[in-house]
Every structure is written in structure tokens, then in C-alpha cells.
Amino acid sequence: MSTVRDSVLTRGARGLGALLCLLLALIGVGWIIRDLTIAQHGADVGRFWLGQLPRPREFTAWATSALDPLLVLGALVVAVAALRTAVASTLVTGALLSLAAATALLRIPLVWMLGAGWLQGLDSGLMARARLTALVQLALAVAMIAVCAAGQRPDGTGGRGVHGLPAPQSAAYGVVRAVPPVAGHGAPGRPFKGPAVTVAVLLGAAGIAVTGWEIHWWAQLGGDIYAKGLFGDASVFRALLQPPVHWQAVALALLALGAAAAALRRAAWSRPAALTAAALLCVHGAVALAFAGHTGKLGRFAVLPVRAQLELGSAGFVAAAGLAALITAARPGVPAAAPETDEVLAYGATPGEARPPHAPPPPSTLPPGW
């Protein structure tokens, strides 16, 4: 990722990235509004997101899941960050790439699921619109990646001062600074060591926990039945825009482990990647706990079989680890040096004047006729 570290995203690329995020958010909002219009009560949509199965007012299917409002919120946050010039370019690039990766992973199976024809009884026009939505969101994700790749330009500083002069490491005779140099080393937005290690441990442990349970279910259910929950089948269908249960778990595990590896390297883009993975993991675990509470399993936790206790404990750990990683990754990283206020100037030089920083100071009294 050295190209991301040593380059910046142009203003046009940031604006285009924000536009793509807004389109992604608007599509999600449209489907959420659609679910609200078919619900018998507005709260039924929230109950469905938490694992319950309330019936819609019409003979149709729910479209959204708990991940959809999260993707909408994430897209809006990334759009605002892309438009704010105060946000470091590496963070904007990382946020766009993380949002694109999450969107692509969660929408890919819908392309073949909604086109398989095994969902009998549903409105074919609704199915076609849902499949078109998945294709459009995938296209938007690809466009975000293309914007990040094509919108980069070299940073140009290369660790040097203004006008190509070497930036001194400390104040020297004949050199003044408008403000003290910013503490910290590395690309702007790069996480500090302590938070980076904490995020890596939390996301790595949560990702391993989710992966471990997927291996368990593959061995327990067998390859054929597990494949239905991985690639989609009418028996595991819940909502039009919700990926199969095992596919969703595998996708979140990949995002978590990838963000953990980036945090260990303290990559400049690791914080937005960690925020994305942590938020998804937190919601994933919280929904499992809410469903267990609705079915009464939490109240009977002590008398449940050991496997059920381990499953609920794992869901609680994933939710807690995701929340802790979310809070830790949200902490500020290495600050960005102000491009003008930290400029190295020689005595008597004006901004924009190419005088070497070792130029001698002017005399205390000006010569006659100066």
C-alpha cells in the first residue's frame, strides 16, 4: 500500500467518491422506506432486523436486514469525510475501499440467488428490482475502487520542506516556524501503536471465533446442507437483500481478519477498515443475542446444552469485541501537519519566497537610505 501512503486523493476524486456513497445510501434508504410501507406497524421492521419474523401487511417479502441501515450510515459518513478537506486523504481512500469491499462481499451472492428462480410466489418485478439493486451496488463498489486507483496523485513532498528544501529536524540559527512541529511520525491518520495492537487483537479474535463456528457448522451439517446456507437456497431465504447466513459470516470474518492484519502493520488505511469490520461484527453479534433473548434462550442459559452456551457466549464476545474495536479505532491517529502554518521560513523571508532556511538574519538597524 505504498502508493496510498505516498499519494493523495485529488479534489475531483474525493467529490466523485462522495457522490457514489450518496447514491449507495439513497438506494438503501429507498428499500428501507419500502419495508416501512408494507409493515403492519413501523416497529415490525426493527423486530425483523433483530431476528423476529413479523408478517408484512401484504403478501410479499421483506427486503432489508440489520446490515442495510448500517451500510446506509457508513455510506453517509464516508461521503461527509470525503467532502471535508480536514480529513486526511489516506483516511478517505481507506474509507472508500472499506465500504466498497463490504458492499461487494455482502451483495455478490444476491446476483445468482435472485436469479435462480427457486423463490416461488414472489412478485417477479420485485425480484427483478432487488437483483438490479444488487448489480447497481456492485457497480458502485467497483466505481469506488476505480476512483481510488485513478484519483491518486503523488504527494510531492517526499519528506522535504517547502520549495524542495530539506525540512530540518530541529530549529536552527536563522530558522523560524509559525507553530511548533507536529509530534508523531508516519502518514496522517496512521494509528498509534497501542490502539493499533488493541484493534488487531480484538478483530483478530472475533474473526477467528466466527471462522471457528463456520468450520464447526460445515462439519456438523455436511457439505451439501452447509452449501445451501453459503450460496443460497429457498430454505434459508429471509430477505431479498440479505446474503445467506453462512456467506454473511464468512464475509465478516474476512473483513475482520483483513482489518486486523492492516492494524498490525499500522497502515494508514487500517482505521477506516477496522471501523467498518468492527461495526458489522458488533451488529452481527448483537442480532444473534437479540434473537436468543426473543426465543428465551438467554433466560435459560444455565440449562442449555454446552454447545448452545458456547454459541451464545461466542455471539456475546463478537458483539463486545466489535464494540471495543469500534471505540478504539475511532480514536485519532497521527495528526496531519498543516501545509502552510508549519512552513519553514528564513529570517526576513515571506511566504512563497524561496530563501534557504540557513540564510543569515537581517541587521538590527537598517543601513541609511534602505
Image: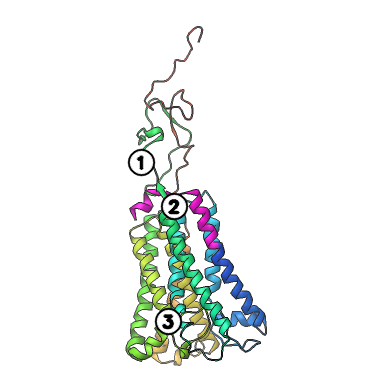
Going from N to C along the chain, the mark reached first, 2 or 1, is: 2
Q: What residue is shown at x 56% (from left), y 66% (from top)?
A: 25
Going from N to C along the chain, the mark reached first, 1 or 3, is: 1
Q: What residue is shown at x 43% (from left), y 42% (from top)?
A: 182
Q: Nearer the viewer, mark 1 or mark 3?
A: 1
Pointer 1 residue: 159
Counting from the top left corner in percent of width and height, residue 138 is at 47, 69
Q: Nearer the viewer, mark 2 or mark 3?
A: 2
- Amino acid type for the residue under numbered disc 2: Gly
SS state under label 2? loop
Counting from the top left corner in percent of width and height, residue 158 is at 35, 42
Q: Is 300 contained in the magenta span?
A: no
Q: From this view, report whether residue 175 is shown above or below residue 66.
A: above
Q: From this view, report whether residue 222 is shown above or below residue 133.
A: below
Pointer 2 residue: 151
Magenta segment range? 1-21
For disc 1, the neighbor class at 10 Å (few under 14, some 14 to 19, many from 20) is few
